[in-house]
């Protein structure tokens, strides 16, 4: 992947104990979904500040606060060069250097590190106790240039988000979502490229009484000027009027490497980065959906072109942050509790099952602890008091001796001054799960259409080396060769090189691979993942919410490849999350002719 655009997924995993940190992340090429890192209500404001645009480390920003924040989090975006390299990053806050954060690319397991694509990092850490009244300085450094470190280490920027009280201020309800999605066209994932054109981000339960204004801010990495992309909130296109000039009619370009201009104004130049804010008051609902699109097929040819005089979309882009704030009238704020549906693991007859519960507060902090009551079939299992951290949510885990049969698991949350909240789930308990998977003949979705794709850095570098080698072999001057080498290196670092997707059998085509997943065991299967491989290379990962005992589900797996003969493999629960009775049927292989 070329260095100039710094491209490059979620799988967000929470600990089973009470935690204050938002999440730990696993690398995924396709992206790590945006999930709530914090929410609550404050009489004051949610303040952001940052330094944006690709630069060598360190990057530094300042933020001035009236008071110590109720909650604060700091972020850094970094380009790794490839998911194969490792290195480190380190925040410094008001002169205090925090612990180094290890960056391991495709092997990453670190809390608050989101790595997707070919090495695009979004790094987050809590800073609530580190910031105070007055001017605060936050910086981030990386291992760029360190002996033995191959990681690129350049920074997209550094950013602070803080919730701060203010006497006499408005009541502001907020939710902050973080992750690292990877939207990309064909040609970015190896021999058999995937394609990801859009992602939906749900934002639930946010509209309060007396609302006067709602504002949405988003942060995107690896954006490109002149390549359209789109942002929708509850179906409405954001960003003012469609852009004109060298764009097709109807195109918009949120990620144009110029921040704070999408809703009007001239904005600020921010290389490969965009942060934008929008008034979404007219579109707000109780349950909202935010959509990022890397492009649209405006000319109707069945593909989203990224090259030529009028591109239709981005080669790739990484939505990493979304902040929704709602200002409302009223003099009284109170806690607003909610409980996520419980997750139940190891629920087999006679085994110790684990009931995992997340409780959230979208209102003002409760005066005391939140009491969580867990019941199975109306019989109390455990009651626990939980002190919510500044982020406004926590997870607990409760043990339960599972007995055979169908059970109703219910969780309620209560706190002083708050209305009770609850959630439940039915679970079938019996013998261990037994997941079996099968695949059918792939179905072509559209006619073949050549599409422009950006040449990855290794390919561009190889081409540069070949040209230089020819130059020297042809007895050209060494000085000229070095000048040519320098020019080519600059071109690789600064200019997107393009090439048409090609293969012996033609250009890439969209297919659907039918997959059936069956659970022949006696217990409901909880969530797990399914990986699809094409010619030995993973091209898609599906998140399966679960399969009921004795039931089955059917999935349509998207695959982008050239027509011809290909070998397909689909693997259920390769990571071994499930206590599966027979793992020999968790994999299906086959050779198919893709028409």
Image (tube, rainbow, N blue to C red):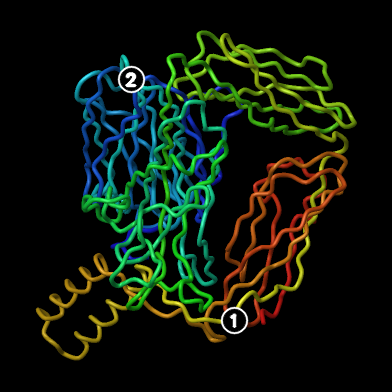
From the viewer's perspective, is 1 left or right of 203?
left
Residue 188 visible in image: yes
Q: Quadrant of residue 217?
A: top left
Residue 294 spot, x, y in % from top left: 44, 61
Location of residue 258 with respect to 96 vertically, above or below: below
Residue 110 spot, x, y in % from top left: 46, 38
The residue shown at (87%, 38%) is: 431
Residue 512 spot, x, y in % from top left: 67, 69
Q: Quadrant of the N terminus?
A: bottom left
Location of residue 187 with respect to 347 vertically, above or below: below
From the viewer's perspective, is 74 left or right of 282?
left
The residue shown at (69%, 19%) is: 412
| Front residue (pair 575, 500) | 500
Identify the residue at the far bottom of this view: 474
Residue 148 visible in image: no
From the viewer's perspective, is 402 left or right of 335?
right
Residue at label 2? 169
| Front residue (pair 16, 555) | 555
Judge the density around disc 1: few (<14), some (14-19), many (≥20) Cα neighbours within 10 Å: some
Q: CA distance from mark 1 to mark 2?
A: 58 Å
| Front residue (pair 212, 150) | 212
The residue shown at (52%, 81%) is: 449
Judge the density around disc 2: few (<14), some (14-19), many (≥20) Cα neighbours within 10 Å: few
Residue 225 spot, x, y in % from top left: 29, 63
Q: Quadrant of the C terminus?
A: bottom right
Location of residue 134 with respect to 385 vertically, above or below: below
Report the disc number at residue 333.
none
> Which numbered disc, 1 or 2, marks the residue that appears first in the sequence?
2
Report the disc number at residue 447.
1
């Amino acid at each position: 992947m070329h260095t100039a655009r710094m491209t490059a997924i979620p799988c967000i995993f929470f600990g089973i104990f009470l935690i204050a940190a938002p999440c730990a992340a696993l690398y995924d090429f396709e992206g790590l979904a945006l999930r709530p890192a914090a929410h609550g209500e404050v009489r004051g404001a949610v303040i952001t500040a940052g330094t944006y645009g690709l630069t060598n480390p360190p990057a530094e920003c300042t933020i001035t606060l009236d008071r110590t924040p109720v909650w604060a989090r700091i972020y850094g975006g970094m380009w790794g060069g490839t998911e194969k390299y490792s290195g480190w990053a380190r925040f410094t806050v008001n002169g205090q250097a925090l612990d180094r954060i290890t960056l391991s690319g495709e092997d990453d397991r670190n809390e608050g590190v989101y790595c997707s694509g070919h090495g695009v990092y979004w790094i987050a850490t809590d800073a609530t106790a580190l910031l105070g009244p007055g001017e605060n300085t936050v910086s981030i450094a990386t291992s760029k240039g360190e002996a033995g470190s191959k990681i690129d280490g350049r920074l997209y920027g550094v950013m602070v988000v803080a919730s701060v009280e203010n006497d006499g201020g408005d009541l502001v309800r907020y939710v902050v979502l973080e992750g690292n999605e990877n939207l990309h066209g064909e040609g970015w994932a190896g021999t058999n490229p995937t394609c990801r054109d859009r992602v939906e981000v749900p934002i639930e339960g946010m509209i309060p009484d007396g609302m006067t204004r709602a504002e949405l801010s988003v942060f995107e990495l690896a954006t490109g000027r002149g390549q359209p992309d789109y942002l929708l909130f509850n179906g409405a296109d954001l960003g003012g009027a469609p852009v004109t000039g060298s764009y097709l009619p109807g195109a918009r370009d949120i990620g144009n490497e110029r921040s704070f201009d999408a809703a009007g104004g001239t904005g600020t130049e921010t290389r490969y980065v965009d942060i934008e804010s929008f008034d979404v008051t007219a579109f707000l609902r109780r349950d909202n959906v935010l959509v990022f699109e890397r492009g649209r097929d405006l000319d109707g040819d069945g593909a989203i072109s990224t090259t030529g005089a009028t591109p239709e979309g981005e080669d790739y882009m990484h939505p990493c942050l979304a902040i929704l704030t709602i200002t409302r009238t009223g003099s009284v704020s109170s806690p607003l509790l909610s409980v996520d549906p419980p997750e139940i693991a190891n629920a087999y007859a006679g085994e110790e099952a684990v009931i995992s519960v997340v409780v959230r507060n979208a209102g003002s902090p409760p005066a005391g602890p939140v009491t969580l009551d867990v019941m199975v079939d109306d019989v109390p299992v455990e009651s626990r008091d939980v002190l919510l951290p500044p982020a406004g949510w926590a997870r607990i885990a409760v043990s339960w001796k599972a007995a055979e049969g169908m059970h109703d698991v219910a969780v309620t949350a209560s706190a002083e001054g708050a209305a009770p909240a609850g959630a439940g789930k039915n679970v079938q308990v019996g013998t261990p799960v037994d997941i079996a998977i099968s695949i059918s003949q792939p179905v072509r979705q559209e006619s073949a259409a050549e599409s422009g794709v950006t040449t990855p850095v290794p390919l561009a570098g190889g081409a540069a080396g070949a040209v230089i080698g020819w130059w020297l072999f042809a007895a050209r001057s060494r000085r000229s060769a070095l000048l040519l080498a320098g020019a080519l290196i600059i071109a690789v670092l600064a200019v997107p090189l393009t090439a048409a997707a090609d293969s012996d059998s033609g250009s890439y085509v969209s297919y659907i691979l039918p997959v059936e997943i069956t659970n022949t065991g006696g217990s409901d299967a909880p969530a797990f993942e399914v990986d699809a491989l094409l010619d030995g290379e993973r091209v898609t990962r599906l998140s399966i919410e679960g399969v009921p005992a004795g039931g089955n589900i059917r999935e349509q797996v998207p695959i982008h490849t050239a027509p011809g003969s290909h070998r397909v493999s689909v693997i259920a629960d390769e990571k071994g999350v499930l206590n599966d009775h027979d793992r020999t049927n968790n994999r299906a292989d086959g050779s198919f002719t893709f028409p």
